Image (tube, rainbow, N blue to C red):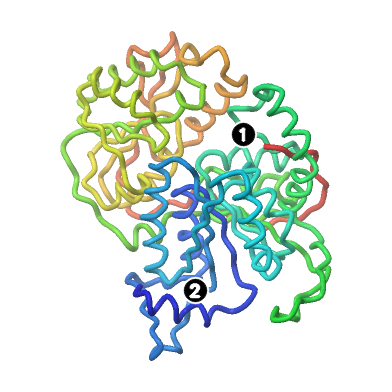
Amino acid sequence: MSRSGRDATRGRRSAGGTLAFVESPVQLLNVLEWAHSAAVISAAPGPVEAGPAEAGVRVPDVTVVVLSPHDPMTRGQLRRVAELARDEGVAVRWEEARGGPVAPVKTIGSLARELRRARRVVIGDPFSRYVQLLLTLTSARDVVVVDDGTATMEFVSQLADGERLVRWHRKGSAPAGPQAAAQAVLFAPFARRARSRLTPGAAAPQAPPRAGEPEGRDRGSVRRVEIFSSMPVDASDARLRELGVTVAANDFAWTRSRFGPPRLTRGTDLVGTSLVETGVVDLERYLEGVTALAREHGATRYFAHRRESSEKLHRVQSATGLEIVRPDLPLELVARRGPIGRTVVSFPSTVVHTLPLALAGTPVSVAVCEVDRTWFTAGASPRAEGFLSGVTDSARRVRRLGDTGIQGEGAGRTMAGPAPAEAAPAPQQPSPTSISREAGQASA
Protein backbone atom coordinates (compact mmCIF):
# COMPACT_ATOMS: atom_id res chain seq x y z
CA MET A 1 0.00 0.00 0.00
CA SER A 2 1.24 3.49 -0.78
CA ARG A 3 2.07 5.90 2.05
CA SER A 4 -0.83 8.16 1.07
CA GLY A 5 -3.16 5.18 1.11
CA ARG A 6 -1.94 4.17 4.57
CA ASP A 7 -2.42 7.68 5.88
CA ALA A 8 -5.92 7.86 4.44
CA THR A 9 -6.95 4.59 6.05
CA ARG A 10 -6.07 5.73 9.55
CA GLY A 11 -8.97 8.10 9.73
CA ARG A 12 -11.48 5.51 8.53
CA ARG A 13 -10.72 2.79 11.06
CA SER A 14 -13.54 2.66 13.56
CA ALA A 15 -12.74 3.46 17.15
CA GLY A 16 -12.49 0.49 19.47
CA GLY A 17 -11.61 -2.14 16.85
CA THR A 18 -9.14 -5.02 17.06
CA LEU A 19 -5.71 -4.58 18.67
CA ALA A 20 -3.17 -7.37 18.11
CA PHE A 21 0.14 -7.80 19.94
CA VAL A 22 2.91 -9.85 18.34
CA GLU A 23 6.53 -10.57 19.25
CA SER A 24 7.56 -12.98 16.49
CA PRO A 25 7.09 -13.41 12.72
CA VAL A 26 4.99 -16.56 13.16
CA GLN A 27 2.63 -14.73 15.51
CA LEU A 28 2.17 -11.97 12.94
CA LEU A 29 1.57 -14.51 10.17
CA ASN A 30 -1.07 -16.21 12.31
CA VAL A 31 -2.77 -12.87 12.99
CA LEU A 32 -3.09 -12.48 9.20
CA GLU A 33 -4.47 -16.03 8.96
CA TRP A 34 -7.00 -15.22 11.71
CA ALA A 35 -7.99 -11.94 10.01
CA HIS A 36 -8.51 -13.81 6.72
CA SER A 37 -10.55 -16.54 8.44
CA ALA A 38 -12.69 -13.96 10.26
CA ALA A 39 -13.18 -11.95 7.03
CA VAL A 40 -11.46 -8.98 8.62
CA ILE A 41 -9.23 -8.70 5.54
CA SER A 42 -10.18 -9.30 1.94
CA ALA A 43 -10.48 -12.86 0.69
CA ALA A 44 -9.13 -11.78 -2.69
CA PRO A 45 -5.35 -11.44 -3.12
CA GLY A 46 -3.77 -8.12 -3.97
CA PRO A 47 -2.70 -5.01 -2.09
CA VAL A 48 -5.30 -2.65 -0.65
CA GLU A 49 -5.00 0.81 -2.20
CA ALA A 50 -7.24 3.24 -0.36
CA GLY A 51 -6.46 6.78 -1.40
CA PRO A 52 -8.60 9.86 -0.80
CA ALA A 53 -10.64 9.15 -3.92
CA GLU A 54 -11.55 5.74 -2.59
CA ALA A 55 -13.12 6.84 0.65
CA GLY A 56 -15.74 4.13 0.42
CA VAL A 57 -13.21 1.28 0.42
CA ARG A 58 -13.60 -1.02 3.42
CA VAL A 59 -10.48 -0.86 5.57
CA PRO A 60 -9.51 -3.76 7.88
CA ASP A 61 -10.43 -2.72 11.42
CA VAL A 62 -7.30 -4.18 12.99
CA THR A 63 -4.08 -2.66 14.25
CA VAL A 64 -1.05 -4.86 14.88
CA VAL A 65 1.43 -3.70 17.51
CA VAL A 66 4.86 -5.27 17.08
CA LEU A 67 6.65 -5.52 20.43
CA SER A 68 10.02 -5.80 18.76
CA PRO A 69 12.65 -8.14 20.20
CA HIS A 70 16.45 -7.67 20.20
CA ASP A 71 17.36 -10.58 17.92
CA PRO A 72 18.32 -9.26 14.45
CA MET A 73 16.98 -12.29 12.56
CA THR A 74 13.61 -12.06 14.29
CA ARG A 75 13.43 -8.32 13.68
CA GLY A 76 14.23 -8.80 10.00
CA GLN A 77 11.51 -11.42 9.52
CA LEU A 78 9.03 -9.28 11.45
CA ARG A 79 9.65 -6.33 9.14
CA ARG A 80 9.08 -8.52 6.07
CA VAL A 81 5.80 -9.95 7.39
CA ALA A 82 4.76 -6.46 8.51
CA GLU A 83 5.02 -5.32 4.90
CA LEU A 84 2.76 -8.17 3.83
CA ALA A 85 0.27 -7.08 6.50
CA ARG A 86 0.34 -3.49 5.28
CA ASP A 87 -0.33 -4.73 1.75
CA GLU A 88 -3.54 -6.22 3.16
CA GLY A 89 -4.55 -2.85 4.57
CA VAL A 90 -3.66 -3.77 8.15
CA ALA A 91 -2.19 -0.98 10.27
CA VAL A 92 1.15 -1.99 11.77
CA ARG A 93 2.71 -0.10 14.66
CA TRP A 94 6.34 -0.90 15.48
CA GLU A 95 7.31 -0.44 19.14
CA GLU A 96 10.92 -0.62 20.38
CA ALA A 97 9.49 -2.25 23.46
CA ARG A 98 12.81 -3.55 24.75
CA GLY A 99 15.05 -0.63 23.89
CA GLY A 100 16.32 0.11 27.40
CA PRO A 101 15.08 0.10 31.01
CA VAL A 102 12.40 2.75 30.46
CA ALA A 103 11.19 1.38 27.10
CA PRO A 104 8.45 -0.85 28.61
CA VAL A 105 7.03 2.08 30.57
CA LYS A 106 6.97 4.28 27.46
CA THR A 107 5.44 1.54 25.33
CA ILE A 108 2.68 0.71 27.79
CA GLY A 109 1.95 4.39 28.35
CA SER A 110 1.65 5.04 24.62
CA LEU A 111 -0.75 2.10 24.24
CA ALA A 112 -3.01 2.96 27.19
CA ARG A 113 -5.68 4.72 25.13
CA GLU A 114 -5.83 1.99 22.47
CA LEU A 115 -6.04 -0.68 25.18
CA ARG A 116 -9.01 1.07 26.80
CA ARG A 117 -10.84 1.45 23.48
CA ALA A 118 -10.21 -1.98 21.94
CA ARG A 119 -13.24 -4.24 21.59
CA ARG A 120 -11.08 -7.24 20.72
CA VAL A 121 -7.49 -8.11 21.64
CA VAL A 122 -5.48 -10.69 19.71
CA ILE A 123 -2.30 -12.10 21.27
CA GLY A 124 0.31 -14.55 20.07
CA ASP A 125 2.16 -15.51 23.24
CA PRO A 126 0.12 -15.88 26.44
CA PHE A 127 3.32 -16.87 28.29
CA SER A 128 4.97 -13.49 27.60
CA ARG A 129 5.15 -11.26 30.65
CA TYR A 130 4.91 -8.25 28.40
CA VAL A 131 1.65 -9.53 26.90
CA GLN A 132 0.33 -10.56 30.30
CA LEU A 133 0.91 -7.05 31.61
CA LEU A 134 -0.92 -5.55 28.63
CA LEU A 135 -3.85 -7.92 29.19
CA THR A 136 -4.33 -6.51 32.69
CA LEU A 137 -4.88 -3.04 31.18
CA THR A 138 -7.66 -3.87 28.72
CA SER A 139 -11.34 -4.56 29.22
CA ALA A 140 -11.90 -5.88 25.69
CA ARG A 141 -14.86 -8.23 25.47
CA ASP A 142 -13.12 -10.61 23.05
CA VAL A 143 -9.69 -12.16 23.43
CA VAL A 144 -8.20 -14.26 20.62
CA VAL A 145 -5.06 -16.36 21.09
CA VAL A 146 -3.27 -17.27 17.86
CA ASP A 147 -0.46 -19.80 17.63
CA ASP A 148 3.05 -19.12 18.83
CA GLY A 149 4.18 -22.51 17.63
CA THR A 150 3.78 -25.65 19.70
CA ALA A 151 3.51 -23.51 22.86
CA THR A 152 -0.23 -23.38 22.11
CA MET A 153 -0.52 -27.04 23.06
CA GLU A 154 0.98 -26.39 26.47
CA PHE A 155 -1.10 -23.23 26.93
CA VAL A 156 -4.35 -25.10 26.27
CA SER A 157 -3.37 -27.86 28.69
CA GLN A 158 -2.45 -25.42 31.45
CA LEU A 159 -5.54 -23.28 30.83
CA ALA A 160 -7.85 -26.29 31.00
CA ASP A 161 -6.18 -27.63 34.16
CA GLY A 162 -6.16 -24.26 35.94
CA GLU A 163 -2.38 -24.25 36.19
CA ARG A 164 0.12 -21.40 36.23
CA LEU A 165 1.24 -20.38 32.76
CA VAL A 166 4.82 -21.66 32.44
CA ARG A 167 6.70 -22.37 29.20
CA TRP A 168 7.11 -26.10 28.67
CA HIS A 169 10.93 -26.06 28.66
CA ARG A 170 10.90 -24.30 32.06
CA LYS A 171 8.21 -26.38 33.70
CA GLY A 172 9.54 -28.26 36.70
CA SER A 173 12.68 -26.13 36.78
CA ALA A 174 13.52 -23.56 39.45
CA PRO A 175 13.98 -19.90 38.42
CA ALA A 176 17.49 -19.22 37.15
CA GLY A 177 18.94 -17.45 40.16
CA PRO A 178 17.66 -15.23 42.99
CA GLN A 179 16.95 -12.28 40.68
CA ALA A 180 14.67 -14.35 38.45
CA ALA A 181 12.94 -15.76 41.53
CA ALA A 182 12.34 -12.26 42.90
CA GLN A 183 10.98 -11.07 39.56
CA ALA A 184 8.57 -14.00 39.49
CA VAL A 185 7.26 -13.09 42.95
CA LEU A 186 6.84 -9.40 42.05
CA PHE A 187 5.07 -10.21 38.79
CA ALA A 188 2.75 -12.84 40.29
CA PRO A 189 -0.24 -10.48 40.88
CA PHE A 190 -0.15 -9.30 37.25
CA ALA A 191 0.19 -12.89 36.04
CA ARG A 192 -2.85 -13.96 38.06
CA ARG A 193 -4.95 -11.16 36.60
CA ALA A 194 -3.78 -11.90 33.07
CA ARG A 195 -4.65 -15.56 33.63
CA SER A 196 -8.19 -14.54 34.54
CA ARG A 197 -8.40 -12.40 31.39
CA LEU A 198 -7.70 -15.56 29.39
CA THR A 199 -10.68 -17.27 31.02
CA PRO A 200 -14.18 -16.56 29.67
CA GLY A 201 -16.61 -14.92 32.05
CA ALA A 202 -17.90 -11.53 33.09
CA ALA A 203 -15.89 -8.70 31.57
CA ALA A 204 -14.17 -6.23 33.84
CA PRO A 205 -16.16 -3.09 34.72
CA GLN A 206 -15.35 -0.23 32.43
CA ALA A 207 -14.68 3.37 33.35
CA PRO A 208 -16.77 6.08 31.67
CA PRO A 209 -15.39 6.95 28.23
CA ARG A 210 -12.94 9.82 28.11
CA ALA A 211 -13.22 12.73 25.72
CA GLY A 212 -12.99 11.53 22.14
CA GLU A 213 -13.56 7.86 23.03
CA PRO A 214 -16.54 5.81 21.80
CA GLU A 215 -19.60 5.29 23.94
CA GLY A 216 -22.07 2.47 24.00
CA ARG A 217 -19.87 -0.38 25.21
CA ASP A 218 -21.78 -2.83 27.36
CA ARG A 219 -20.80 -2.82 30.99
CA GLY A 220 -20.56 -6.23 32.59
CA SER A 221 -20.78 -7.96 29.21
CA VAL A 222 -19.58 -11.53 28.81
CA ARG A 223 -15.91 -11.91 27.89
CA ARG A 224 -15.26 -14.39 25.09
CA VAL A 225 -12.00 -16.28 24.52
CA GLU A 226 -11.08 -17.96 21.24
CA ILE A 227 -8.06 -20.07 20.35
CA PHE A 228 -7.21 -19.93 16.65
CA SER A 229 -4.77 -22.73 16.04
CA SER A 230 -3.23 -25.15 13.57
CA MET A 231 -2.08 -27.30 16.47
CA PRO A 232 -4.01 -30.43 17.50
CA VAL A 233 -6.26 -28.67 20.01
CA ASP A 234 -9.26 -30.85 20.81
CA ALA A 235 -12.27 -28.54 20.83
CA SER A 236 -14.44 -31.38 22.13
CA ASP A 237 -12.33 -31.70 25.28
CA ALA A 238 -14.72 -31.60 28.24
CA ARG A 239 -12.34 -29.25 30.06
CA LEU A 240 -12.52 -26.68 27.27
CA ARG A 241 -16.29 -27.04 27.08
CA GLU A 242 -16.49 -26.36 30.79
CA LEU A 243 -14.24 -23.31 30.43
CA GLY A 244 -16.26 -21.93 27.53
CA VAL A 245 -13.25 -21.49 25.26
CA THR A 246 -14.00 -21.50 21.52
CA VAL A 247 -11.52 -23.24 19.22
CA ALA A 248 -11.20 -22.37 15.53
CA ALA A 249 -9.02 -24.12 12.96
CA ASN A 250 -6.15 -22.34 11.20
CA ASP A 251 -5.66 -24.11 7.87
CA PHE A 252 -3.32 -21.46 6.38
CA ALA A 253 -5.91 -20.40 3.83
CA TRP A 254 -4.43 -16.89 3.56
CA THR A 255 -0.96 -18.27 2.83
CA ARG A 256 -2.29 -20.66 0.20
CA SER A 257 -4.42 -17.97 -1.43
CA ARG A 258 -1.54 -15.50 -1.69
CA PHE A 259 1.44 -17.70 -2.63
CA GLY A 260 2.38 -20.79 -4.61
CA PRO A 261 2.21 -23.49 -5.60
CA PRO A 262 5.97 -23.76 -5.17
CA ARG A 263 8.62 -25.04 -7.53
CA LEU A 264 10.08 -28.28 -6.14
CA THR A 265 13.71 -29.33 -6.01
CA ARG A 266 14.88 -32.94 -6.23
CA GLY A 267 16.66 -32.94 -2.90
CA THR A 268 15.67 -33.11 0.75
CA ASP A 269 15.59 -30.07 3.02
CA LEU A 270 16.31 -30.24 6.76
CA VAL A 271 14.64 -27.85 9.20
CA GLY A 272 16.73 -26.66 12.14
CA THR A 273 15.56 -26.24 15.71
CA SER A 274 16.40 -24.00 18.66
CA LEU A 275 16.29 -26.87 21.18
CA VAL A 276 20.03 -26.43 21.73
CA GLU A 277 19.64 -22.70 22.34
CA THR A 278 16.88 -23.29 24.90
CA GLY A 279 19.08 -25.74 26.80
CA VAL A 280 16.96 -28.81 26.06
CA VAL A 281 19.25 -30.74 23.69
CA ASP A 282 23.02 -31.28 23.85
CA LEU A 283 24.91 -29.61 20.99
CA GLU A 284 27.19 -32.56 20.17
CA ARG A 285 24.32 -35.03 20.03
CA TYR A 286 22.39 -32.62 17.84
CA LEU A 287 25.29 -32.33 15.40
CA GLU A 288 25.55 -36.12 15.24
CA GLY A 289 21.84 -36.34 14.54
CA VAL A 290 21.84 -33.73 11.78
CA THR A 291 24.87 -35.39 10.15
CA ALA A 292 23.17 -38.80 10.17
CA LEU A 293 19.92 -37.39 8.76
CA ALA A 294 21.70 -35.48 6.00
CA ARG A 295 23.63 -38.58 4.97
CA GLU A 296 20.66 -40.94 5.08
CA HIS A 297 18.18 -38.71 3.24
CA GLY A 298 20.48 -36.98 0.77
CA ALA A 299 19.76 -33.54 2.17
CA THR A 300 21.24 -30.51 0.47
CA ARG A 301 19.90 -27.57 2.47
CA TYR A 302 19.43 -26.73 6.15
CA PHE A 303 16.78 -24.12 6.97
CA ALA A 304 17.99 -22.42 10.13
CA HIS A 305 15.67 -21.50 12.95
CA ARG A 306 15.79 -17.75 13.53
CA ARG A 307 17.23 -18.29 17.04
CA GLU A 308 20.08 -20.57 16.03
CA SER A 309 23.48 -19.03 16.68
CA SER A 310 26.00 -18.34 13.93
CA GLU A 311 28.58 -20.48 15.76
CA LYS A 312 26.25 -23.46 15.85
CA LEU A 313 25.30 -23.06 12.18
CA HIS A 314 28.98 -22.91 11.23
CA ARG A 315 29.49 -26.23 12.97
CA VAL A 316 26.46 -27.70 11.20
CA GLN A 317 27.85 -26.61 7.84
CA SER A 318 31.35 -27.92 8.64
CA ALA A 319 30.04 -31.30 9.81
CA THR A 320 27.53 -31.87 7.02
CA GLY A 321 28.44 -29.74 4.01
CA LEU A 322 24.81 -28.58 3.88
CA GLU A 323 23.91 -25.20 2.45
CA ILE A 324 22.73 -23.09 5.39
CA VAL A 325 19.65 -21.02 4.55
CA ARG A 326 18.54 -18.25 6.89
CA PRO A 327 14.92 -17.59 5.83
CA ASP A 328 13.77 -13.98 5.70
CA LEU A 329 10.16 -15.06 6.31
CA PRO A 330 8.47 -17.79 8.38
CA LEU A 331 9.12 -21.20 6.85
CA GLU A 332 5.45 -21.68 5.95
CA LEU A 333 5.71 -18.69 3.58
CA VAL A 334 9.16 -19.66 2.30
CA ALA A 335 8.00 -23.19 1.51
CA ARG A 336 4.79 -22.05 -0.15
CA ARG A 337 6.66 -19.57 -2.32
CA GLY A 338 9.39 -22.12 -3.15
CA PRO A 339 11.64 -23.56 -4.21
CA ILE A 340 11.34 -26.32 -1.62
CA GLY A 341 12.52 -29.93 -1.48
CA ARG A 342 10.20 -32.79 -2.31
CA THR A 343 10.93 -34.05 1.20
CA VAL A 344 11.24 -31.84 4.27
CA VAL A 345 12.67 -33.41 7.44
CA SER A 346 12.20 -31.73 10.81
CA PHE A 347 12.71 -32.44 14.47
CA PRO A 348 9.60 -32.11 16.68
CA SER A 349 8.51 -28.51 16.16
CA THR A 350 5.74 -26.30 14.88
CA VAL A 351 6.44 -27.04 11.22
CA VAL A 352 5.45 -30.71 11.44
CA HIS A 353 1.93 -29.37 12.05
CA THR A 354 1.94 -26.26 9.86
CA LEU A 355 3.86 -27.26 6.72
CA PRO A 356 1.37 -30.00 5.67
CA LEU A 357 -1.36 -27.33 5.84
CA ALA A 358 0.58 -24.62 4.02
CA LEU A 359 1.69 -27.13 1.35
CA ALA A 360 -1.68 -28.84 0.92
CA GLY A 361 -2.26 -29.85 -2.69
CA THR A 362 1.46 -30.26 -3.44
CA PRO A 363 3.50 -33.49 -3.56
CA VAL A 364 5.84 -32.35 -0.77
CA SER A 365 6.34 -34.95 1.97
CA VAL A 366 7.01 -33.82 5.55
CA ALA A 367 8.84 -36.19 7.89
CA VAL A 368 9.65 -35.90 11.59
CA CYS A 369 12.65 -37.30 13.44
CA GLU A 370 12.10 -37.97 17.12
CA VAL A 371 14.49 -36.71 19.75
CA ASP A 372 15.88 -39.56 21.82
CA ARG A 373 16.12 -39.13 25.57
CA THR A 374 19.91 -39.47 25.38
CA TRP A 375 20.02 -36.12 23.57
CA PHE A 376 18.67 -34.15 26.53
CA THR A 377 20.95 -32.01 28.66
CA ALA A 378 21.22 -32.47 32.41
CA GLY A 379 19.39 -29.19 32.90
CA ALA A 380 16.48 -29.97 30.57
CA SER A 381 13.01 -29.70 32.07
CA PRO A 382 11.52 -33.02 33.24
CA ARG A 383 8.62 -32.11 30.96
CA ALA A 384 10.78 -32.01 27.80
CA GLU A 385 10.60 -35.63 26.71
CA GLY A 386 6.85 -35.93 27.11
CA PHE A 387 6.17 -32.61 25.42
CA LEU A 388 8.32 -33.35 22.37
CA SER A 389 6.84 -36.83 22.06
CA GLY A 390 3.40 -35.26 22.13
CA VAL A 391 4.35 -32.88 19.33
CA THR A 392 5.44 -35.86 17.21
CA ASP A 393 2.59 -38.22 18.11
CA SER A 394 -0.11 -35.63 17.39
CA ALA A 395 1.25 -34.53 14.00
CA ARG A 396 -1.03 -35.40 11.10
CA ARG A 397 -0.06 -36.06 7.48
CA VAL A 398 3.62 -36.52 8.26
CA ARG A 399 5.97 -39.49 8.12
CA ARG A 400 7.67 -40.51 11.31
CA LEU A 401 11.19 -41.62 10.55
CA GLY A 402 12.37 -45.02 11.67
CA ASP A 403 15.69 -45.83 13.33
CA THR A 404 18.33 -43.60 11.74
CA GLY A 405 21.15 -44.82 13.91
CA ILE A 406 20.91 -41.77 16.16
CA GLN A 407 18.02 -42.79 18.37
CA GLY A 408 18.07 -44.89 21.48
CA GLU A 409 17.21 -48.57 21.38
CA GLY A 410 13.56 -49.11 20.53
CA ALA A 411 12.86 -45.43 20.06
CA GLY A 412 12.24 -45.53 16.33
CA ARG A 413 9.00 -46.62 14.75
CA THR A 414 7.74 -45.85 11.30
CA MET A 415 4.43 -44.45 10.12
CA ALA A 416 3.57 -44.42 6.46
CA GLY A 417 3.23 -41.01 4.91
CA PRO A 418 -0.09 -39.98 3.38
CA ALA A 419 -0.92 -39.34 -0.21
CA PRO A 420 -0.57 -35.73 -1.31
CA ALA A 421 -3.36 -33.61 0.07
CA GLU A 422 -5.95 -32.26 -2.35
CA ALA A 423 -7.20 -29.61 0.05
CA ALA A 424 -6.08 -28.22 3.35
CA PRO A 425 -7.12 -30.51 6.23
CA ALA A 426 -8.72 -28.91 9.24
CA PRO A 427 -6.32 -29.20 12.18
CA GLN A 428 -9.21 -29.83 14.51
CA GLN A 429 -12.98 -29.73 14.54
CA PRO A 430 -13.97 -26.51 16.24
CA SER A 431 -16.94 -26.44 18.49
CA PRO A 432 -18.16 -23.77 20.84
CA THR A 433 -17.99 -24.42 24.52
CA SER A 434 -18.85 -22.48 28.24
CA ILE A 435 -17.07 -21.40 31.94
CA SER A 436 -16.25 -20.68 34.86
CA ARG A 437 -13.80 -21.68 37.08
CA GLU A 438 -11.11 -19.38 38.34
CA ALA A 439 -7.60 -20.44 37.43
CA GLY A 440 -4.63 -20.66 39.69
CA GLN A 441 -1.66 -18.40 39.94
CA ALA A 442 0.04 -17.60 36.63
CA SER A 443 3.56 -16.63 35.82
CA ALA A 444 5.82 -17.04 32.84
The image shows residue 9, relative to residue 409, as above or below, that is below
Q: Residue furthest left?
A: 266
Query: Is residue 127 rendered to the left or right of residue 25?
Result: right
Instruction: Say the numbered circle drawn on residue 235.
Output: none
**Residue at horizontal 25%, vertical 55%?**
261
Identify the amino acid type marked 1. Answer: Arg
The quadrant where residue 44 appears: bottom left
Query: Is residue 114 rendered to the left or right of residue 68?
Result: right
**Secondary-structure class at tag 2:** loop
Query: Is residue 287 rendered to the left or right of residue 234?
Result: left
**Residue at horizontal 63%, vertical 61%?**
121
Real-space Cα separation, disc 1 to disc 2, in angstroms: 33 Å
Q: Position of residue 343 (x, y in %)?
A: 26, 36
Query: Is residue 276 rendered to the left or right of residue 103?
Result: left
Q: Which residue is mark 1?
A: 167
Please name whichever residue, 11 or 396, is drawn nearer the observer in this view of the structure. 11
Please name whichever residue, 337 or 297, is drawn nearer the observer in this view of the structure. 337
State if disc 2 and disc 1 touch (CB < 8 Å).
no
Task: Estimate how packed mark 2 is, as few (under 14), some (14 to 19) or many (20 or more) residues with alpha carbons within 10 Å.
Answer: many
Of labels 1 and 2, earlier in sequence is: 2
Figure quadrant of the C terminus:
top right
**Secondary-structure class at tag 1:** loop
Q: Which residue is mark 2?
A: 60
Task: Estimate how packed mark 1 is, as few (under 14), some (14 to 19) or many (20 or more) residues with alpha carbons within 10 Å.
Answer: some
Figure quadrant of the N terminus:
bottom left
Identify the amino acid type marked 2. Answer: Pro
Please name whichever residue, 53 or 157, is drawn nearer the observer in this view of the structure. 53
Q: Residue furthest bottom?
A: 53
